[in-house]
Each structure stands twice: as structure tokens, then as C-alpha cells.
Amino acid sequence: MKTLKEYLFEAKEQQKAIAHFNVANSDMLMSVFAAAKEVSEEAGEKIPLVIGVSEGERDAFGVTQIVDYVTSLRNEHDYPVFLNADHTYSVERTCEAIDAGFDMVIYDGAKISHEENLENTKKVVAYRNEVNPNCLVEAEFGFIGSGSSIKDEIPEGVSEETMTKPDEAKAFVDASGVEVLAPSVGNIHGMVKSGNPALNPERVASIWEATKTPLVLHGGSGSSDEDFLAVIRAGISLIHISTELRVVFRKSIEESFAKDETLAPYKYFKSAKEAVQKAAAERIRLFWGMSS
């Protein structure tokens, strides 16, 4: 099986993107995995998948338990499913995920100074090199807000002026040693009620040309299909989806409670799992170039 890094470069060459879905429990995880297998059967190839868990999500699972869970799926089904320690805000917790055997980790220093962010990212890369060389280290570089939530308006500070600049991105990649970069290109975390801002494929292309580093789109939920396809063509090879799945999961459970007073979780989770699988499958088809 190819490494995640190989899959990312391959996706870029083919102008496709790998779907990255955040999951909060085993029901969401199995629904997303079922979606990947469903679309893979349609495509006639095993489409790679990345499972993401934030600090809170992996605490809910158990740090080593989620690694075991995803590894068992990979081995049992001989399927390219990978695990990412999404948005981690301390060096210690990032290194914890490296120790546990995650395939990728994201050290998020968006709320501290550039100098401290760079210094901490270098510490994470150095630790990875010693402990788990196959683990990719990703950095988010540029302001895109925070929180997988429904927002009333675009977060303050998100603008063209705060988008990632190609020369600064290259300098950060070169100095830190990260292999994957999540830039600010019009994207935001969460979904805005009035509509998310437009993505900027020209900025994506410029950052790719400057860094030649796999690029990740964080905050994919709420963007238009046209924008997704444009940034994929420009160089994005991994796209994060979280809020969309949380919305359909919660809505389906609420509808189940409105119809039925059953106390068995596997019964009222059934429609939620189906809704998550449907939503995830639609995103995988789009990102893999299988939708018109």
C-alpha cells in the first residue's frame, strides 16, 4: 500500500483531492468508511480516505483506541484509510499523537506569534523524525477562523489581506520542515448562514508553485462545488469536511426522536449513519472527479 504522502502527490498530479472527514464516534467513522468503500466500488479503485480527530474527538475515542480502530479497518479490508490528529494546540499533545502511531498530525499555532509557532513546529518535526518518521507533519499557515459551527457572519479578520502569501508560505515550509501545508485561501472553519466566502484558486496555485508541498483545504464545509473543483485543479490535494457531517448527524437524530421514543441508540442512530454516509459519499465523488 502506498504511503499517505504518495497518495497526496498522486492526487495533485491527477487533479483530484482526498476527502478528510472528522468523526466524533464510531458510528460516524463506520459511516464515512462505508461511503469510501461505496464510491470505490463505483470507481473501480480504492480511493484513499483520511479520518480526522480533533483533540476533543480523540479524547472521546481514546488516543490509542482510535489508532487501533483505524488500523484494524486498514488491515482487515486492505484499504488506504489514514488517521490524522487534527488541530492540536500544544507540542505535548501533538507528540502524544506521534507516539500513538497517527499517520499525520497538525500542530496549530494560529493563536500565537509567528516566531513561537515556527519554533514549536520545528520541535514537533524533530520529535517526529526520532520517534515516527512515517508520520506527516502539517501546519496551518494563515488565518481562517476557528470552530466547526454554524456562524452568523464571516469571522472578523478573514479577508483577502489575511490570506497566505506564497513567499511567506515557502519560507515557513523551508524553515519548519513540514511536509503538508494548510493555507488561508478564502476558506473558513465552520459554515456561515448567509454563505461561505469564495475560495481563491489563483492563490492556491501561487502557493503550490512556491512550496511544491501538498496543500490542504481546511474548513471545506459550506463551500460551493464549483469552488471545490477550482481549488483542486489549482493544487489542493486534501479537503477537510467536519461541520457538514455534524449537521446531518444531529438533524437525523432529532428527527428520529420526534418520530419514535425508542431508547436503543443503535435504532435512533440508524438514520443518522445513513445520512452521514450519503453526505460523505457525495463529497468523495466530487473531490475524486466523479461528479459532473
Image: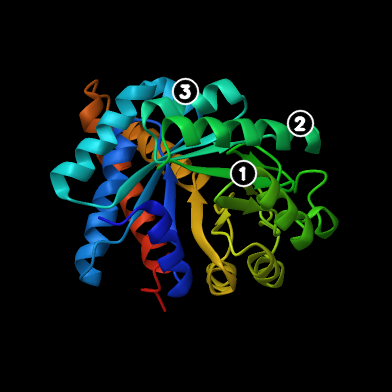
User: Which amino acid type is marked by label 2?
Assistant: Glu
Q: CA distance from mark 2 to mark 3?
A: 20 Å
User: In which quadrant is the N terminus drawn?
Assistant: bottom left
**Regarding mark 3 in the picture, which secondary structure is present there?**
helix
Q: 150 or 34: nearer the eye?
A: 34
| Picture residue at 43% right of the left edge, 75% below the top | 14
Is 127 positioned to the left or the right of 65 in the image? right
Q: Position of residue 22 (x, y in %)?
A: 44, 41
Q: CA distance from mark 3 to mark 1?
A: 17 Å
Is 5 positioned to the left or the right of 45 in the image? right
Q: 188 or 83: nearer the eye?
A: 83
Q: Which residue is mark 2?
A: 116
| Picture residue at 70% right of the left edge, 70% below the top | 206
Q: Which residue is mark 3?
A: 96
Is 291 positioned to the left or the right of 173 in the image? left
Q: 5 or 85: nearer the eye?
A: 5
Q: 248 or 116: nearer the eye?
A: 116
Vertical comparison of 200 with 24: above or below: below
User: In which quadrant is the C terminus drawn?
Assistant: bottom left
**Regarding mark 2 in the picture, which secondary structure is present there?**
helix
Residue 101 position by quadrant? top left
Callout 3 environment at 10 Å: few (<14), some (14 to 19), or many (20+)? some
| Picture residue at 66% right of the left edge, 43% below the top | 176
Pointer 1 with pointer 2, Cβ within 8 A: no
Residue 111 seen in render = no
User: Which amino acid type is marked by label 3?
Assistant: Glu
Mark 2 or mark 3: whose residue is earlier in sequence: 3
Q: Which residue, as the protein is rendered here, is positioned at the far left?
A: 76
| Picture residue at 53% right of the left edge, 28% below the top | 94
Q: Residue 139 got which mark?
A: 1
Callout 2 environment at 10 Å: few (<14), some (14 to 19), or many (20+)? few
Q: Position of residue 153 (x, y in %)?
A: 74, 46
